[in-house]
Image (spheres, rainbow, N blue to C red):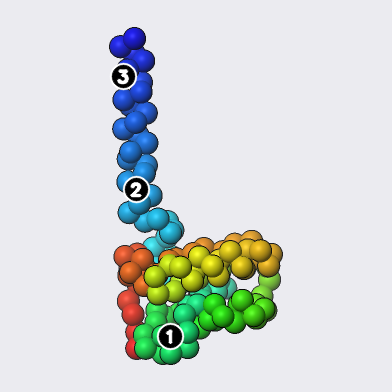
């Protein structure tokens, strides 16, 4: 019985640690330098906010591809297995964009979340 209780405690402890790690970086497991390196070797990084939001400040090397355009059927003209990163203001639109891209057949999509998520992994906003 003691062994069972100890086993349950260890499992709960490990589960809690895994949950805490996932919560601290919920959208991804990459650093911003990883994103930049991937883009330099062919990956794409789309900021899915509006053009006005993008112009007010964005992360290099992101390009603007508004969620509204994706919803209207404007999809990247790239191979379906190209690594794609998406990001927005808060994480809501990037999650929608990631779902739409995946449903369109893109197989390597990473949702970076919102601005604060990207800053957390090392991104610096540029005007």
Which residue is labeled 3 in the image?
6
Q: Which mark is residue 69?
A: none
Task: Tell whether label 2 touches label 3 (CB within 8 Å).
Answer: no
Q: Quadrant of the C terminus?
A: bottom left
| Quadrant position of residue 96 | bottom right
Q: Earlier in the sequence, mark 3 or mark 2?
A: 3
Identify which residue is drawn at 54% across, 77% down.
67
Q: In the figure, 11 relative to 38: above or below? A: above
Q: CA distance from mark 1 to mark 3?
A: 52 Å
Q: Earlier in the sequence, mark 1 or mark 3?
A: 3
- Helix, strand or loop for disc 2: helix
* Residue 41 rendering spot, x and y as whole percentages: 54, 72
Q: CA distance from mark 3 to mark 2?
A: 23 Å
Identify which residue is drawn at 43% across, 90% down.
52
* Residue 110 rendering spot, x and y as whole percentages: 52, 63
Q: Earlier in the sequence, mark 1 or mark 2?
A: 2
| Quadrant position of residue 34 | bottom left
* Residue 62 rendering spot, x and y as whole percentages: 47, 79
Identify which residue is drawn at 40% across, 79% down.
59
Q: CA distance from mark 1 to mark 2?
A: 30 Å
Which residue is labeled 2 in the image?
21
Q: Quadrant of the N terminus?
A: top left
- Helix, strand or loop for disc 3: helix
Of 41 and 84, nearer the camera is 84
Q: Left or right: 74 with respect to 94? A: right
Q: In the figure, 101 relative to 124: above or below? A: above
Q: Left or right: 111 with respect to 23? A: right
Task: Tell whether label 2 touches label 1 (CB within 8 Å).
Answer: no
Q: Which mark is residue 54?
A: 1
The reply to whether residue 79 is visible in this rendering is yes
């Amino acid at each position: 019985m003691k062994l069972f209780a100890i086993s349950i405690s260890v499992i709960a402890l490990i589960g809690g640690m895994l949950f805490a790690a996932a919560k601290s970086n919920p959208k991804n497991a990459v650093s911003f330098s990883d994103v930049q390196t991937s883009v330099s070797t062919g990956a794409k990084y789309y900021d899915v906010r509006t053009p006005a939001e993008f112009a007010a400040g964005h992360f290099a090397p992101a390009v603007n591809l508004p969620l509204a355009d994706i919803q209207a059927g404007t999809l990247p003209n790239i191979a379906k297995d190209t690594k794609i990163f998406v990001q927005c203001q808060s994480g809501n639109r990037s999650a929608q964009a990631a779902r739409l891209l995946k449903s369109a057949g893109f197989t390597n999509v990473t949702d970076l979340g919102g601005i604060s998520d990207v800053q957390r992994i090392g991104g610096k906003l540029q005007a």
